[in-house]
Image: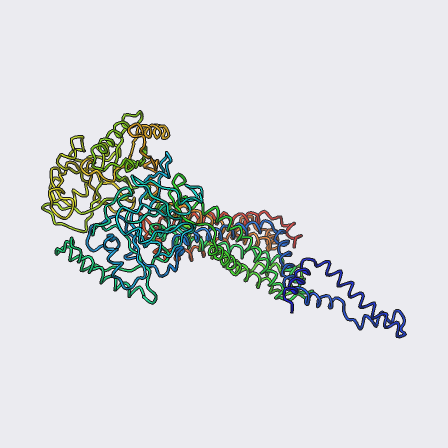
Amino acid sequence: MNLPGELKRRLEMLLHRDRFQRDLDEELQLHLELREQRHRESGLSAASARRAARRGFGNPTVLRENSHMAWGWNWLETFLQDVSYGVRSMLRSPALTIVALLSLGLGIGANTAIFSFMDAIMLRSLPVKDPTQLVVLGDGDEAGVTDRYGSTTLYSYPFFRQFQQKNDVFSDVASVFSMNANPHGIIDHRDQMEPIMVDIVSGTFFPTLGVEPALGRMLTDADDNSEGDHPVAVISYAWWQRALAGDPNVLNHTVKLGDTTFNIVGVAPPDFFGIMVGHAPDLWVPMSMMKAIPPHSNGYKDNFFQSNLILGRLKPGVSRTQAEANVNVLYQQIIRAFPDAKLNAYNLQHLEKTHVPVTSMATGLSYLRHGFSDPLKILMGVTVLVLLIACANIANLLLARSTARAREFAVRQALGARRLRLIRQLLTESFILAIAGGALGIAFAAVADRLLLRMISGGFDADPIPLDVSLNLRLLLFTLFATIGTVVLFGIVPAFRASRIEVTEALKDGRGSSHAATRTPLGKALVIGQVALSVVLTVAAVLFLRSLVNLTHIDTGFASTGVLRLDIDSDVLGLKARDPRMIAMFREIEQRIASLPGVKGASFASFFFHQGSWNGSINVPGAGYNERIDVQHNVIGNDFFRTMQIPLLAGRTFTPADTATSHKVVIISESVARDLFPAGGNPIGRHYFMGHDPLPDTDVEVIGLVKDVKFGRLDEQQRYIDYVPNPQHPSGYGSLAVRYEGDFNAISSGVQHAIHSVNRILPISHITTLDAQVQRTIANQRLVAQLSAFFGLLAVFLSCIGIYGLMSYLVSRRTGEIGIRMALGAARSNVRWLVMRDVVLLIAIGIAVGVPATLIGSRLVSTMLYGLRATDPLSLIAATATLLLVALIAGYLPARRASRIDPTVALRYE
């Protein structure tokens, strides 16, 4: 068989059916005429020859059908006929079709949108070679620098080099600096600086990941074998397109960071973003150039500058368990063998308890997972429930519609249509509805993804997180399966139910069929299910909304409204933090800004709310040392407390007399005074040591006591905080807060002008308000609250449509009965109650089922609530009362319409 020719012939027949029909008719007519001619030649009359020819030829209709089956795709033609009929059928019921499409579109679109974020944040593998073989030492969740013995996440660069040489379980090992540098740099010799995101990695980084360049070359171990003499960089594909307009001569360009000019040696492939989901660096530079990248970390040769993540690729046949055993043996050997290791009893105790886990990083590392994994799982469950409600709603509408089409199906069966043929027709209509709903859902998801990305990023005024949530094959497959699933959920039962009819009974016009149609246990069960699921979603929405309200009313300890926030990058000056010129510059900037009209105070600090921390232990003489207690240290300006409106409870604040050469002083929060100082003692004038060892250069005197404030998150437990003046510990100092009155834009312009009047080359970035900065920290709680509220309302709306549709259908089928009742003297109120009785019963059963289900599932959301329990009775009562009220209104409308039926019209209708 010539397969291409066969396919071509069948396609031509499908596309040119009319021409094929004409040709077939001509051929059949020719055969009949030839037979008739032979019979006439044999001596028969013309009429007898015609009859004999027709008898011998057979039934032309059967021959046409056999020819179609042999030459075409009968199944496809039948399917297209079903599709055409189904489309016409849906267009005859536009209201039902619109409701069904919107329900499906919102349900499938919501599931697709949430799944796209789950896929991007939690499920998608790194775009590297064989990502399942990649692991990270520890859990990969820590960032910064630590000096503690027993660190299982952060390691020094010398440790990495020894581990690379001695391990037996990894084919390749790489190191990544855990803190993402974001210095301002200059491309080539341009005048303007711009922020550039830089990742500092070992030369083995790209070979370990198996990433090949799109252009040029990647970093190699040769770029990382000696400190400070390999100023080379690999740039990301996106940055190449954005900053250099995709210049093919990119390898001739340079980037200046600080005082060092880096030569671009390669471009990463388009899909590679690094190993951190939600973080897309612009440049990768070798670890050997660590000191050249602001803030100029000096850890290339420091055995205990523990700041790096270590990742490795497992050798073939090596399991993670085997790798973990080898890692822990090497860990102890390397740490203890360093010549500067302080192996005192205290540190040895830590080392003996240390166990380094080996964690898979097939899906990369991500700070987003901690904040959004649980919310996304909850939202995925919510959207699935919404889709179930939508499917139940559509199934109910289709059940009612199929009952109204009973006479049509009876006529078709009387004319010879088999039950399987009717089922196929109905499933085809459901399939069309689902496909259209799925396409609408993808359109909804494309819009929702942009909105959700902005919400996750902290608002529309914040820079969007570099997260790829665009359509891809996995997402389209998910949508396809969701669409097919909806066909199964809402299409099969109505199809089988509608095709199971008594032909004789259905063809009657009497009340018997109508009365039978009013018995709809399946429809009522679907409404009960909708109400029960709506109870679950409504209670969850109320809980999350109340939790969000509780968070927004937390006393932060400072006044966040009316405060401008911005950052400056002083590293571009090339001065050390302790340089007197740098300290004087910050003080002059504060003074000039404070003198501006409308400004009530201005101060720099190392950290404002949710900007990281410098934390460590303190040693208070006379109190027992507790290594597990961390104090958050903050370096601040003299006007910090007035700017932030943090009350001074005792003592004094910093003054210009607190200089680098004066005695070191500190201000503590009230929780430090209460918990860490001996009971009953006044902390003012007392001394303590910042760190474990009581050394002279770590001794500080307490000169002030201030109110506790929130430091990292609104829902955090109270933290211990102390404050030190910038001249005595100048580092990481570039965040500015300005308290003002008046127009934000005018104040912002004046502040920037004042900064540049002191030093015109200082880059200014992240201009926002302190209030917006605080609100961004509850982005996940706001996301869950707002979306759960939306889906809760959508669920209630769909359930009300289901109640309204079912009761309207029942009222229409009981028109004659209601007319008789009213003709016999029934009052309108009795008729309304006749209908409302069924409504109340359905809602009551639904709530009775939904409340226990809510209480059972409450433990799933308990950890995401603040200030209330998941079984909070007020939330349960408020949600059920709201649902009950709205559902009763939906049921009252058909009941009211039933009570207005004219008995004469109703009896004539019957």
Do we see residue 504 in this rendering? no
Question: Where's residue 416, x and y in %?
Answer: 68, 66
Residue nearer the viewer, 295 or 679: 295
- Say how the picture is coloured: rainbow
Do we see residue 900 in this rendering? yes
Residue nearer the viewer, 473 or 92: 473
* Quarter placement of the N terminus: bottom right
Q: Is residue 64 above or below residue 712?
A: below
Question: Where's residue 366, x and y in %?
Answer: 34, 51
In the visual, does 640 lie left or right of 765? left
In the visual, does 293 lie left or right of 688? right
Question: Where's residue 157, x and y in %?
Answer: 25, 52
Q: Is residue 597 above or below residue 165?
A: above
Residue nearer the viewer, 718 or 47: 47
Q: How many marks?
A: 0
Residue at the image point whose x is 43% and y is 42% from the top: 242
In the visual, does 796 lie left or right of 618? right
* Quarter placement of the C terminus: bottom right
Outermost residue to the bottom: 42
Residue 733: quadrant of the picture = top left
Question: Where's residue 409, x and y in %?
Answer: 64, 61
